[in-house]
Image (tube, helix red, strand yellow):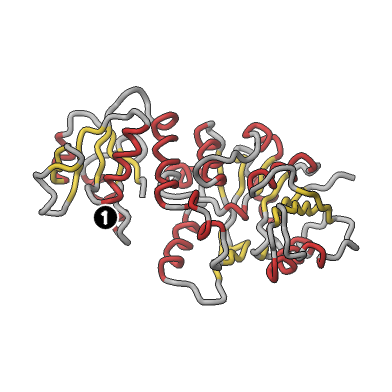
């Protein structure tokens, strides 16, 4: 009998965290699963210590190199109706897979199911990560996930569960010059594939110094912004409408440069800082925000990342009749 879910776990030097990650999948309330471990050229022998007594475990060598290739190698061997992603350093709560499948059964329009997370670390969790966790767990409905797609990746990669046909449509993960998971979710969004999450925390997401997000330059802020600029220009924007960037600071100027590299024109900047207003950045005017109602066209990209700024800007735009997603988007 084929499993209901194939869980694919790329492993490169899983070390002391691997056993807990594996156990958390084998102890799921949903028993009809297979766990596909893909060895991405490990040299720490952690995989050798995983018991092969459980027939649900299958181990393969990565045909290529890197986490995207490792997942795709596992995908070729998966036989489940659903395919789940899991990292070798996280801990899935016992009802994770069962709850996600129930969610997809109740939402046939949704193709990718994520989950709410608890970020944890041996060194404690900083305030920035707590705010990030709250934002992630607030992105649950398909409409909110679509709206927030260009702020950051609203689906934590190790939580996702795909309908297998959706993953086939997407062709698995690519290996782009930016994060492979964000690339996949942006591609899904551009194809109109809806994404959502059930209520409640279903995965404990471990933060530590050796995570790829801390060691690989493809996960840098600049690379995330490059992914946004590319998908904005080639998928989200309609026609040749020019762009106005809210925020003439470093984030706004970076977005300007990336948009220009993609061939998209920028009209100017909006800002609240009195020393920027009236001057020029990148040779373009910096206007006060009250110009918002007098702009001659132009889609507004909000590139302001200060804590609490998003809510204030959203309120301001609502007061001025600007519709999020149609006339402006947050990209930071």
Q: Nearer the viewer, residue 218 or 167?
A: 218
Indicate left or right for 260 with 134 as reference: left
Q: State the image coordinates of residue 54 (x, y, percent, origin top left).
A: 88, 61
User: Farthest top residue?
Assistant: 239
Q: Going 89% across and 56% down the picture, which residue do you hit?
A: 55
Indicate left or right for 227 with 60 as reference: left
Residue that mark 1 sits on: 312
Q: Is residue 238 above or below residue 270?
A: above
User: Farthest bottom residue?
Assistant: 123
Q: Is residue 156 above or below residue 204?
A: above
Q: Taking the image as drawn, is residue 105 in sight?
A: no
User: Farthest left residue?
Assistant: 278
Q: Taking the image as drawn, is residue 27 in sight?
A: yes
Q: Nearer the viewer, residue 128 or 325?
A: 128
What is the quadrant of residue 325 in the picture? top left
Q: Going 27% across and 45% down the picture, which residue do you hit?
A: 253
Q: Is residue 298 above or below residue 227?
A: above
Q: State the image coordinates of residue 154 (x, y, percent, origin top left).
A: 49, 50
Indicate left or right for 222 with 44 as reference: left
What is the quadrant of residue 175 in the picture? top right
Q: State the image coordinates of residue 234 (x, y, percent, origin top left).
A: 43, 29
Q: Quadrant of the N terminus?
A: top right
Q: Residues within 10 Å of mark 1 (few under 14, many from 20)?
A: few
Element under disc 1? helix
Q: Going 64% across and 49% down the picture, which residue do you hit?
A: 67
Indicate left or right for 22 with 258 as reference: right
Q: State the image coordinates of residue 68 (x, y, percent, origin top left).
A: 63, 45
């Amino acid at each position: 009998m084929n499993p209901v879910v194939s869980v694919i776990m790329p492993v490169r030097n899983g070390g002391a965290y691997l056993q807990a990650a594996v156990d958390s999948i084998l102890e799921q309330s949903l028993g009809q699963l297979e766990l596909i471990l893909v060895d991405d050229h490990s040299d720490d022998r952690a995989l050798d210590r995983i018991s092969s007594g459980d027939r649900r475990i299958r181990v393969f060598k990565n045909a290529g190199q890197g986490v995207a290739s490792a997942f795709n190698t596992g995908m070729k061997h998966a036989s489940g109706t659903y395919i789940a992603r899991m990292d070798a350093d996280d801990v899935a709560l016992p009802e994770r897979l069962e709850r996600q499948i129930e969610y997809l059964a109740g939402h046939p329009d949704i193709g990718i199911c994520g989950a709410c997370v608890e970020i944890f670390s041996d060194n404690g969790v900083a305030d920035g990560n707590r705010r990030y966790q709250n934002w992630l767990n607030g992105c649950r409905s398909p409409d909110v996930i679509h709206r927030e797609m260009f702020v950051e990746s609203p689906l934590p990669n190790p939580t996702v569960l795909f309908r297998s046909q959706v993953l086939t449509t997407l062709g698995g993960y690519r290996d782009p010059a930016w994060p492979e998971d964000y690339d996949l979710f942006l591609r899904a969004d551009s194809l109109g594939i809806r994404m959502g999450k059930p209520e409640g925390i279903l995965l404990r997401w471990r933060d530590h110094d050796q995570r790829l997000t801390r060691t690989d330059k493809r996960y840098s802020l600049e690379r995330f912004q490059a992914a946004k600029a590319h998908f904005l220009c080639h998928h989200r924007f309609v026609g040749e409408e020019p762009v106005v960037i809210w925020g003439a600071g470093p984030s706004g100027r970076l977005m300007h440069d990336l948009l220009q590299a993609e061939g998209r024109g920028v009209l100017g900047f909006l800002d609240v800082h009195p020393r920027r207003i009236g001057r020029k950045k990148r040779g373009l005017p910096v206007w006060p925000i009250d110009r918002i109602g007098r702009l001659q066209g132009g889609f507004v990209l909000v590139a302001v990342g200060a804590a609490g700024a998003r809510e204030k800007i959203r309120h301001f735009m609502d007061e001025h009749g600007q519709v999020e997603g149609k006339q402006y988007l947050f990209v930071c």
